Image (cartoon, helix red, strand yellow):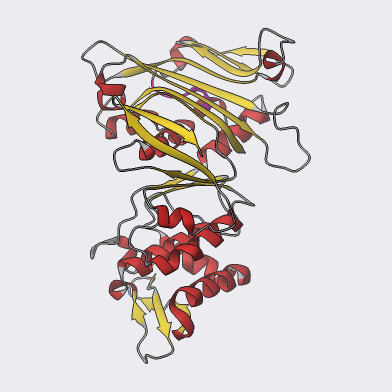
Amino acid sequence: MKLLQLDIEGFRSLFKVTWKPGDLNVVIGPNASGKSNLLKVLEMLSTAARGGLGKYIQREGGMEPLLWDGRTEEILFRLKTAPVEENRDLERESLTYGLDLVRLGITSSTYRIEYEILGNYHRVEKGEKDQPFKLLERNLYNAVIFDETEKELTASPDSISEQETLLSMAAGPFTINRLIAAYQTNLSNWRIYQDFQTHREAAIRQPTLVQTETSVAADGQNLIAVLHTLYTGSREFKQDLNKAMAAAFGDDFEELVFPPAADQRIQLRVRWKSLQREQPAADLSDGTLRFLFLIAVLANPKPPPLIAIDEPETGLHPSMLPIVAEYAAEASRRSQVIFTTHSAEFLDAFGDTVPTTTVVHREDGKTCLRIA
């Protein structure tokens, strides 16, 4: 599922913006311009599809800090997506998901979902119809799910949570519309990376339980398990990661190893040709761990439908940036890739590969977007 257009109103510094990303994207602008708020929107929508919107807003401090300047009364999202398969008509088969959140009371930090819809607007946009082909629609407590012939199934009002999306409730193995389930799965599987920690006590530096994991979590702290699963189980991934490490660190890099630790745990170590002792994760530099994280995300043989990474240049030597750019360009053939950065050097690292570049600045407390 490819993101074609994102419309946002009233969210943090995004007072009213429209964004049309491509397959490979760099969002660039100074600090405090609102770049990270775009990723926050993507994270919030993906979380809402999983049924975790209430906890997400609570974790953010309630509605007040999410509203523009704390004084708008609602947040509106419109998300237009399309299939990524070749030879598909993107506009004809596109789906638009709309979600409206309203603050309850002027001083309240609680909210309710006022309106929600998932549908195809192709004929509406062409002037052929005045109503979209709907998959689901909810107006406060009046919730309707449609099957693939637009037959309605009305939900009982007392069965609808005012703080969780109908999308999260309507999907599942028993849904009457498989398009809803596919859409919910895709949106739920977006991966937004904004807070990869490498401090001395971080989980990434500690031994981890042996378990099969193929997707790096949003906080990146399952990286060792993912590296172990893919590095030992996928020849293609191992070759890609070894190639990236050799490009970054030269011929001295030999391989990753995962020796056992106590209590069914494994460690991550790097084997260097010049050293007899393997270097454990606890002793690796922040930059090395961040580089491994980026390559594990971008070289994943089964990537999520959308990957968004905040400030990938953090902690990296400038010589590593073209390597990251190369792997990002390759990843964008299989997944939509979005970076936010304030580094012109990172943007330059793409060379002849020209990403869709969105320039961000702030005026009167409002984020403004411009496709360069």
**Residue range highlighted in magenta:** 163-167
Residue appearing at x 55%, y 74% in the figure? 243
User: Is residue 290 inside the magenta stretch?
Assistant: no
Up/down of 299 relative to 311, above or below: below
Which residue is at the front of the view, 241 or 357?
357
Please tell me in which quadrant of the rendered image residue 103 appears.
top left
x and y, in percent, of residue 253 in the image: 45, 82
x and y, in percent, of residue 294 in the image: 45, 60
Which residue is at the front of the view, 353 or 88?
353
Whether residue 243 sits left or right of residue 163 in the image: it is: right
Which residue is at the front of the view, 95 or 353?
353
Residue appearing at x 56%, y 30% in the figure? 5
Question: Is residue 213 at least partly visible in the picture?
Answer: no
- Tell me which secondary structure the magenta stretch mostly adopts: loop
Up/down of 75 relative to 356, above or below: above
Up/down of 73 relative to 209, above or below: above
x and y, in percent, of residue 209 in the image: 39, 65
Question: Is residue 6 at least partly visible in the picture?
Answer: yes
Looking at the rendered image, the quarter that the N terminus falls into is top right
Whether residue 278 sits left or right of residue 130 in the image: it is: left
Residue appearing at x 33%, y 31% in the figure? 362
x and y, in percent, of residue 27 in the image: 45, 43
User: Is residue 166 inside the magenta stretch?
Assistant: yes
Please tell me in which quadrant of the rendered image residue 55 appears.
top left
Which residue is at the front of the view, 225 or 340?
340
Which residue is outermost to the right?
87
Up/down of 153 relative to 337, above or below: above
